[in-house]
Image (cartoon, rainbow, N blue to C red):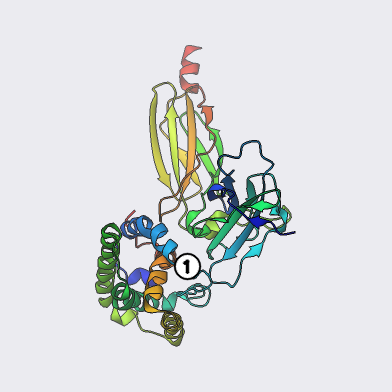
Amino acid sequence: RGLRTCLISTNLRLIEESFRGIKQAIQAKDTLQNVTILSPSETLHGMKALDVCCMTKNLLAFYVDRVFKDHQELDPRILRKISSIANSFLYMQKTLQQCQRLCHCRQEATNATRIIHDNYAQLEVRSAAIKSLGELDIFLAWIEKNHQGTSAA
Amino acid sequence: VPCVSSGLPKPTNITFLSINMKNILQWNPPEGLHGAEITYTVQYFIYGQKKWLNKSECRNIHRTYCDLSDETSDYEHQYYAKVKAIWGMNCSKWAETGRFYPFLETQIGPPEVALTTDEKSISIVLTAPEKWKKNPEESSISMQQIYSNLKYNVSIYNTKSNRTWSQCVTNHTLVLSWLEPDTVYCVLVESLVPGPARLTRPSEKQCVSTLKDQTSELKVK
């Protein structure tokens, strides 16, 4: 019982479109090409359906409670897009709260989440935030793949 | 002998052209050097790894493209590539791509389309495109295996009434019913994947005619 039963519906297209508008600018500011935060091959790619809900919840919290707070953006256009993504994530967090029973966390998801937070902590906070924002496409692609019923067509 | 990084202008418009995970790096020659004997050297980088890697088949080449499909075949990773121009002993600075994410950026090619007709119907059978593979002997991977939510947009054009309509289907067979007998219909199909918008490539237009209406033929006799 994967994410499908937890994430009722969210418009991934809107989030993807917002990200596309900032992808080039944000990724260009990330000059540390030899480091990743999400490390998908260690964290997301092997994730079992059973752990998808918890991992989504943890990653949403990572972005809402850490990344969006640590990032300082001067460009109003980019700031608007980031705010739109942040609001969508807050909405997704609310919908996930409605299925606490189905969203328990096993060690696998907890370990994967710790790797991400450890990666983040190893960088200067502004660099870490910029890099995490630049890796939003990895997270969004993972949500799309693990919850095809999510996006409004 | 390494070239000297001089004021030679960089190649421009460096991008990946990706179709079914066949990933070609392409660029334009540096501006203002028409007629000069320019060669190029390419390197690529796997995001999160440690260093830039050489592509030996794309060292000192005259062409303005380089096939990096093999080097970027793990489509869930992300990549960078860069190219520099060389003229005699001088070389330009590197021109670099943005971060390339094959899983989200590759264009999904059209399916194979097989049509069979009846008096008032056309049966369409679609076969999903295949992922790029290094050797023809390798077993094929269908793009459907990578994108399980792959859909098709089928456009149908009635050449007699000039009417066009389209249908979005997920399965591989489709029967168009209640058509006009003895009429030519043309079909075009595009592959679609929900997610960030991507460029699409429609199939070749295929036209077939529905059969003559046998009942009216009998009455005439």
Q: Residue B162 placed where, x, y %?
A: 39, 23
**Figure check: B23 above or below A146:** above
**Figure check: B46 above or below B16:** below
Q: Amino acid at mark 1?
A: Thr
Q: Residue B54 placed where, x, y %?
A: 67, 62
Q: Nearer the viewer, residue B185 or A8?
A: A8
Q: Tell me if residue B193 can be seen.
A: yes
The part of the image, by quadrant, that contains residue A70 is: bottom left
The residue under label 1 is A31
- The residue under the point 30% across, 66% down is A73
How packed mark 1 is, by other alpha carbons closer than 10 Å (few <14, some 14-19, many 20 or more), is few
**Figure check: A55 above or below B47:** below
- The secondary element bearing badge 1 is classed as loop
**Figure check: B208 above or below B43:** above
Q: Residue A31 placed where, x, y %?
A: 47, 67
The part of the image, by quadrant, that contains residue B81 is: bottom right
- The residue under the point 40% across, 41% down is B167
Number of labels in the image equals 1
- The residue under the point 71% across, 59% down is B2
Lateral position of residue B114 relative to residue A115, left or right: right
Q: Residue B51 placed where, x, y %?
A: 61, 70
Look at the image and tell me in which quarter the N terminus of chain A lies: bottom left
Q: Tell me if residue B130 can be seen.
A: no
- The residue under the point 51% across, 49% down is B107
